[in-house]
Image: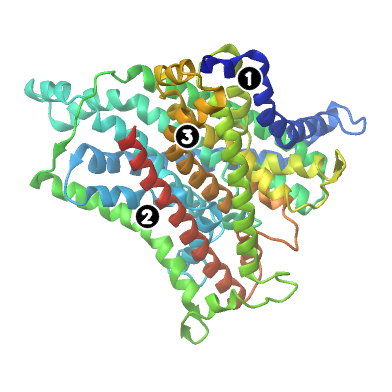
Amino acid sequence: MRAARLHHPLSWWALAALPLAFLGLFFLWPLGTVLARGLTDAGVDLAGMIEILTSPRTADAVVTTLLLATAGTVGSVVIGVPAAYALYRLRWRGQATVRALAVVPFVLPTIVVASAFTALFGRSGGLGFLGLDQSMVGIVLALVFYNVAVVLRVVGGAWAALDPAPTEAARTLGADPRRAFLHVTLPALAPAIGSAAAVVFLFCATSFGVVLVLGGTRINTIETEIYLQVAQFLDLRAAAVLSILQLLFVGIALAVAAWARRRRDRSSTMRRVDGTRLATRGDAGAIAVILVVLALLVSAPLVALVERSLRTTDGHGVDHYVALFGQPGRAVLPVPVWAAAVNSLAAATVAAAVATGLGLIVASLLMRRTGRSAILDSVVMLPLGVSAVIVGLGMLLTLNRSVLGVDLRGSWWLVPMAQAVIALPLVVRTLVPSARAIPAPMRDAASTLGASPWQVWRLVDWPLLRRPFGLALGFAFAISLGEFGATTFVARPDQPTLPTAIYRLLGRPGIENVGMAFAAAVVLALMTASVMMVSERMRTTVGSDL
């Protein structure tokens, strides 16, 4: 009996029904509700939708979104490309450590990044005299801080594998270093730079927490405008219409990113080339300048966050950390911050378990490339193309009722379910390559010896998927722990998560409230970084095993 029995159409679809039912209830239905609410609500015709789309607030949000995304992308590329040269093209002692530190900002929750730049640019911050609090420049710097790691990874990987022979030939023919770079190296790197820029633009355009906290009431993007229409104006129809606009916006950005990725893949050679070289004395100056810029960009906000978390009315101390275990004023936060942290841990645990459990099923079903596996893969990847804000709004509009006899109104379970929806595509992308790398002869041999499909999976597949599963579990937990966009809509006021508690504390006056927000942000950053460090170490182990 062959292991292929798992792929019999009936049994295959029976197993696929689990992730499809989950996504249908917690993603497709809410998304459809948002679309329906935006296109037609209580008989309102298309004129109402056009009125919302052409309003001054919407126009301002669209322009601001484009400006911030463009400026954040340009800044990330301008800093990231030279840094990719120093950290990936050249080889020098301590390089691996600097690489790891350079990508730390990307794994931090957006609310932590926003808190760090608030600590830096706020009135009492180290750079408060620059007047960048609630400014476009401050938000752009935060977006660059967050996304420069994407350029580093994508462009750095391409640069390290770039064949140096064409550049050396150009130099031999008389071209100076500048001309050789502009006419030989840069065109070869263009697909990778374009791919990284497209991804960064998408991330910047859908950045919710950073803009919401740093923009205050002055600066609104499409995503923050959706939130304000719900939270301040109670206009669900306007929020739904703006969600449709955001879906179109994200769809275009995803299409461009996919095109850029295909172009990058076509330009890459199948032959593995080591294009790196040992750094020389002549490279020392360039490396030093790049490291200083990276150090200032990465360390200044984080140092400011830690300093502000320790600052008290009498100097510095751990008072704000101690206050995390006390009860703030009921008007500030209904529960102690430590209780919000427990809520986050509990929700992240459930979300990670759901996402990785369903992801393992999907990965097992996608081992073979077939027509039905392509359909399942496309459906599971859909949440990547939808903003977390829209996911949260859709769940708020749809699941505020009794569903199949279960009362979901204000249910705590909506938080981990929303987080699981967002984490599931990344879990699948982590597991599928490892699942498809399992040798088919091993599975066929076990099946020939009489093993049932379940035994084949348990004895052959699972031992090879165990480590990637642990990696995916860590990713899902970290993503869920810091999730802010969808959670903002579905979290109950009396059961906040740590990110929503930080946001509420930052919005309250007083050094005690703001100090607790910064202390909580430091705690959340340490929790997330610890999980990601374990995941990164596991990925290294997985790479050596496979």
| Label 1 close to label 2 by CB (< 8 Å) | no
Q: Which residue is mark 1?
A: 12
477 is higher (above) or lower (below) than 317: above
Q: CA distance from mark 1 to mark 3?
A: 21 Å
Disc on the earlier residue, 1 or 2: 1
Looking at the rendered structure, which numbered label has been put on residue 430? 3
Q: Secondary structure at mark 2?
A: helix
288 sits left or right of 475 in the view = left
539 sits left or right of 525 in the view = left
347 sits left or right of 139 in the view = right
What amino acid is at disc 2?
Leu
| Label 3 close to label 2 by CB (< 8 Å) | no
What amino acid is at disc 3?
Thr
Q: Which residue is mark 2?
A: 297
Q: Nearer the viewer, residue 412 or 254?
A: 412
Q: Secondary structure at mark 3?
A: helix
Disc on the earlier residue, 1 or 3: 1
Q: Quadrant of residue 20?
A: top right
Residue 161, x across and y down, in percent: 25, 28
Residue that appears at 76% across and 36% down = 30
Residue 291, x across and y down, in percent: 26, 52
What amino acid is at disc 1?
Trp
